[in-house]
Image (spheres, rainbow, N blue to C red):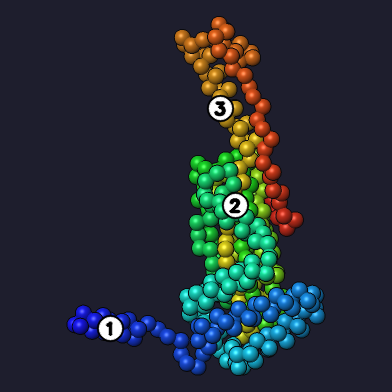
Amino acid sequence: MKHSLIGLLALLFVMACTPTVPSQFIQPDEMEDLLYDYHVAQAMARLDHPGESGEVEKNRNFLAVLNKYGVTQAKFDSSLVYYYSHLDKLKKIYIEVNERLSDNAKSLGADVGTMGHFSQYTANGDTANIWTGTTDLLLMPRPTMNRFDFTVKVDTAFHKGDSFLFQFMTEYIWQNGMKDAVVCFVSKYEGDSIIQTVNHVAVAGLAQIRIPANKEKKLKEMKGYIYLGRGNDLDDKTRKMMFISQIQLIRFHDKEAQNESEIKVLQKDSIQSSNHPGGEKLDSAGDRVNGRLRHKTISPPPGATIHGMDAGSDRIKTKP
C-alpha cells in the first residue's frame, strides 16, 4: 500500500511538471485530427481542380474543415503561432499526421513508389540508404527557422562513379503566395573539382534531386541545405509552413567503374611483381613465362544505370 501511494505521488508530480497546451489553443489530439483532415482536403482539391481554380477549392475545403471542428480562423492562426514557438510539439503532431496519411494512401491501393522501394536498403550494398541525420523536420520562412544545413560523411564505402538520389515527402500549410523551397547539394571531388546540384520544390508530395556520378575523380566532401523562402508574400503574419518527412539519401555504386578500378590495381600489382628482384617475368599478355599460371583480363559486367543531373543543376568549373 505504501509503495502504491509513493508511485501515485510520483506520477502526479510528473504530470504536474509536464507542460500542457493552454486551453485557449487547439489541443494536440484535436490539432492532429484537424491537420489530417486539412491535408486530405488539400490533396482532393489538387486532384479535382488543378491550376488556379484549385486554389479557390483549397480555401473552400480549408474552411469546411474548420467548420467541422467548430474552430474559427482566428483560433486556428493563434494556435499555429503557439505551436510555432513550441516546435517539438508541432513536430510530434506532424509525425503522427504523416503516418496516418501514408496508411490511408496504402489502404486505398496507392503505390508506395520510390520512397517505399528504397526504404528496404541499409547502409551496405551497391544500392544503399546512407542518410543518418534527422528524417523529419519543420521549416518556416522566418529567421533561424527557414534553413536546414547538413553534411554527409564520406568514407571508404564511397567509390568513383557513385551517383546519389536525395528525396523526401512534403506537406504545406500555406495561406497564400508562391511556394518555393530550394534544395542544394555541393559535391567536392579530388583536385577541388566541384559539382553543385539545385532543385526547387513548389508542390506537396515526393521531392527528389539527383546528384550525378563522376567516374574520373573520387568524392571528398558532400554537403547541402534545404531553404524555404517566403515567395512573393512579405507578410510575416501569413500562415506558411513546410513539413518534411522520410528523408533519404540513396547511393548507387557504378559496378563498371568499380570493376575497372579494381582491374587497374591488379594490373599495377602484376607489373610491380614482374619488376621485383627475384620475381618471375610476365609477357605482354600478362601470362607467367613458365606457363604454369596464366592471368586473363576479364571484361567487367555492364554497369548500373547512372542518374543524370536535373535540368536545374549548375556545374561549377574546377578550381585552378
Image x and y of residue 312, in percent? 73, 58
Q: Earlier in the sequence, mark 3 or mark 1?
A: 1
Q: Circle 2 — which element?
A: strand
Instruction: Please tell me how crowded label 3 is: few (under 14), some (14-19), or many (20+) other residues with Cα within 10 Å.
Output: few
Residue 177 in which image quadrant: bottom right
Instruction: Please tell me how crowded label 2 is: few (under 14), some (14-19), or many (20+) other residues with Cα within 10 Å.
Output: many
Q: For the residue marked with disc 3, what is the amino acid? A: Val
Instruction: Judge by depth and name the residue closer to the eye, 234 or 33.
Output: 33
Say left or right for 108 vs 272.
right
Residue receiving disc 2: 250
In front of the other: label 2 or label 1?
1
Residue receiving disc 3: 265
Q: Residue furthest left?
A: 2
The quadrant of the image that shows the C terminus is top right
Question: What residue is drawn where x is 50% and y is 63%?
Answer: 134
Q: Circle 3 — which element?
A: helix
Q: Is residue 124 visible?
A: yes
